[in-house]
Each structure stands twice: as structure tokens, then as C-alpha cells.
Amino acid sequence: MSQALAMDATAVRPLEERVVLVVGAHGALGHASAQACADAGATVVLLGRKVPKLNRVHDAIVRAGGEALLYPLDLEGATPDDYAEMAERIGAELGRLDGVLHCAAHFGGLTPLENSDPADFARSIHVNLTARWWLTQACLPLLRATDDAAVVFAIDDAAGQGRAYWGAYGMAQSALSALVGTLHAELANSSVRVSGLAPGPMRTTLRSKAFVEDAEPQAREAAEVASSCVHLLSAAGVDRRGLVWNPSSV
């Protein structure tokens, strides 16, 4: 193969030979991004709590010629030890980890804080923030072992600006933006890049709990956002290192 053809192949498959863990892989953005990562050459580890839905994502990737593995795990009940075991198994079975994409989310619907259910409040903070950090923390040794690794947090920036009725979900989104900045500052001299992705309104089940479809005509399909996830996970994503990127504003 000529040098020019080799460069073209790399451009078409920017995640070639990379291993990417997609958290929340059976949700709208997780599914679309997992497929896009596989199409871009990555071996994708599909993490989620609903096994039948994970199987459907897995089968779709394999039918398209991609490589994927299942890792069923419920973020609500998982402990730091569970995440450590997950990282150990990925390292043992695949030998590396080059990227983590956080798409899992919990949103119970719009409600005044005064009327929020205490258990649901705690669940939302945990799934949307604490569990994301525990999982990332467990993966850092594997990520540091590669020359170029990326951690990407999907962030609902509109919900996290102190808006009424978004409750614990909105607070967690604000905290995720802070987490991106803190991790970036601490990992700036390492091979691990940290970024946030603020895709804007998407047509998802989560979003439908807050808005009727007609109220958000600008909302995009998750598949339209998936290419931005691939960009942040690829070597080209260095241009967004430490940033929360809103590709719809470009």
C-alpha cells in the first residue's frame, strides 16, 4: 500500500486498533456512538444494565463487520470494586484501553426540588456523577498505559445552568463540567485527554420526559452527534482537550 493510501485509510478509520468502552451503550447516544466507533475501527466494549438491549447493539455492530464485547453492569448498584474488576478484565482480555465514553444517564423528569423524592435525588447524583467518576478512576491505569487515550463525558449543558425543576440531574451536569476541568488540570502532562461533549437537544427517551417533540424542532437525532464522539476519542480530539465542546454551535 502506498503512503498516500495508508494515510487515507487512517483518515477513514480514525479509531483503528483502539479499544473504546462505551458506558450506557444501549441508550440513544450510546448505541449510535458505539456503532460509529466500531465503524471507525475500534473494538467496542458495550457497558449497560439491560442485557437484551446490549445484545441488539452488539449484533448490529457485528453484522456491520465491527468488533464488540458485552459488559453488563448496573451503575446504580456497582461498587468501586466492581469497576476495578471491570478494568482488570478489559486489560486481561483486550490488553489495552484507549477511550471511555460516558453516555449513561438517569433522569426522573422535571419536578420542583421541594417535591423531589429523596431516593431518586440520590440515585440521579450517583448515576450521573459519582458512578461516572468511580468508573473513570478504575480505568485510569489502563488509559495511562497507552500513548494517546481519551475520556469523554456527555453533558447536558442546558440542564446544568441552574434552571428550575431539573433537580439533581441538572446539578450533576454542572458538576460534570467541573469534573472535566479538574481532571484536565491534573492529567494535563499525561497521555490521557479529558473532554466534555455538550451535544444540545437530541431526540431521546430521556429528553422526551422533559419536552414534547414539537417543542424542540431543533433537536437532532443521536446518530448526528455520534461523529463528534468519534472525533473526541480519536487522536484529532486533542484540539478539544480540557473543553466542553458543543459541536452544534460551530
Image (tube, rainbow, N blue to C red):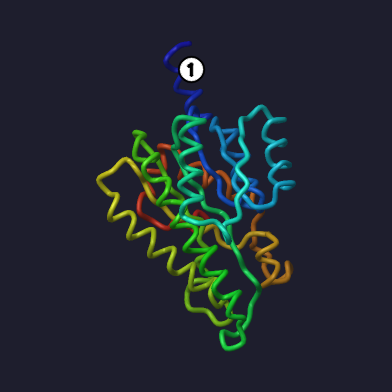
**Relative to 2, residue 45 above or below:** below
The part of the image, by quadrant, that contains residue 7 is top left
Picture coordinates of residue 242, whole percent (x, y): 35, 54
- The amino acid marked with disc number 1 is Leu
In the image, farthest residue toward the top: 1
Q: Between residue 73 and residue 200, name the one nearer to us.
A: 73
Relative to 244, 209 lies left or right: right
Front residue of this view, candidates 57 and 219: 57
From the top left corner, tell me how far across and down residue 132 is, in percent.
Answer: 48, 57
Task: Give the labeled residue for mark 1.
Answer: 5
Q: Secondary structure at mark 1?
A: helix
What percent of the width, then of the height, locates residue 82? 51, 50
In the figure, residue 236 lies in which quadrant?
Answer: top left
Q: Is residue 202 above or below residue 238?
A: below
Residue at position x 60%, y 63% in the image: 201
Give whichever of 20, 3 is nearer the camera. Answer: 20
Establish if 238 lies above or below 113: above
Residue at 28% in and 56% down: 185
